[in-house]
Amino acid sequence: MSQHSGLYYPNLMVRIYLQALEEVMGKNGINALLNLAKLSHLIDNYPPANLNKEFDFADFSALGQGIIDMYGPRGGRGLALRAGRAAFADGLSKFGATAGAADLAFKVLPMSVKLKVGLKSMAETFTKFSDQKTSVEEAEEYFIYIIHGQCPICWGRKSEQPVCYGAIGILQEGLRWVSGGKDFRVDAAKCIACGEKEGVFHVHKEPL
């Protein structure tokens, strides 16, 4: 495992993600993962449900690497996607990551506006509550969701393929939520683990 980064996620975000992993992997699966990731102190002892920034990016990255080590690149990718989706559905939405998305005024907005508002509020949520600095830009056919500088999924990892599938799962489920149940294609365009300077995701504007 890499050295600690000094960059942090809030405890609650990690608690939600671990609970989502447990939902997807089962109790024995999550315990095996925590042992493999050298995070066995978290077995039956998830971080508290508070917003203190205390969970190091290096430990979060170790979870992602552990999933790949356990299930292989392909199986790990599928599992990370499912866990990311479950994490959003189970609680990240409560962070106000989709603030106002249930309002009647929001429901009548054009789809591209809904997506833009939803993505921006997700980016702002991570920027506000964690040390993950995130922003959104717009191109003609897709929105560009950018994790700047340091990514908690990629910290200390080297890979020939993008490793940010948990983030893709969170984005997919968040978009599904703001769009009223539609699915959108999200591509990992750049990944810091592959040697890029930032993590970049292309979120296609047209639903699948």
Image (cartoon, grey):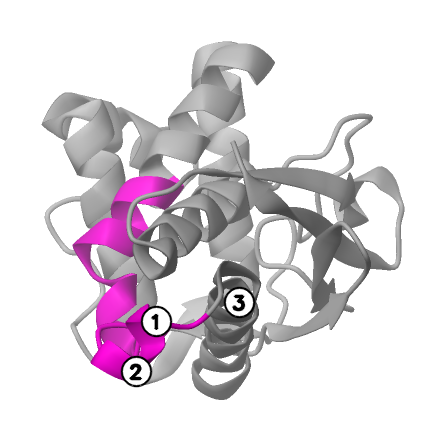
Which residue is tagged 2? 105
Q: Please state the total of marks drawn on the protein image.
A: 3
Spatial separation of the CA atoms under disc 2 and disc 3: 17 Å
Q: Is residue 26 above or below residue 163?
A: above
Q: Earlier in the sequence, mark 3 or mark 1?
A: 1
Which residue is tagged 1? 108
Residue displayed at 59% across by 63% down: 4
Task: Give the amino acid at mark 3.
Answer: Leu
Comparing 7 with 131, the one in front is 131
Which residue is tagged 3? 119
Q: Are marks 3 and 1 in contact (CB under 8 Å)?
A: no
Residue displayed at 58% across by 50% down: 153
Circle 3 Cα neighbour tier, 10 Å, few/some/many (<14 / 14–19 / ≥20):
many
SS at badge 3? helix
Q: Position of residue 51 (x, y in %)?
A: 29, 83
Direction from residue 142 to residue 177 in the image, left or right: left
Residue 94: in magenta span: yes
Q: Position of residue 78 (x, y in %)?
A: 45, 21
Q: Position of residue 16 (x, y in %)?
A: 24, 57
Segment tinted magenta in the rendering: 84-109
Task: Give the amino acid at mark 2.
Answer: Ala
Task: Give the amino acid at mark 1.
Answer: Val
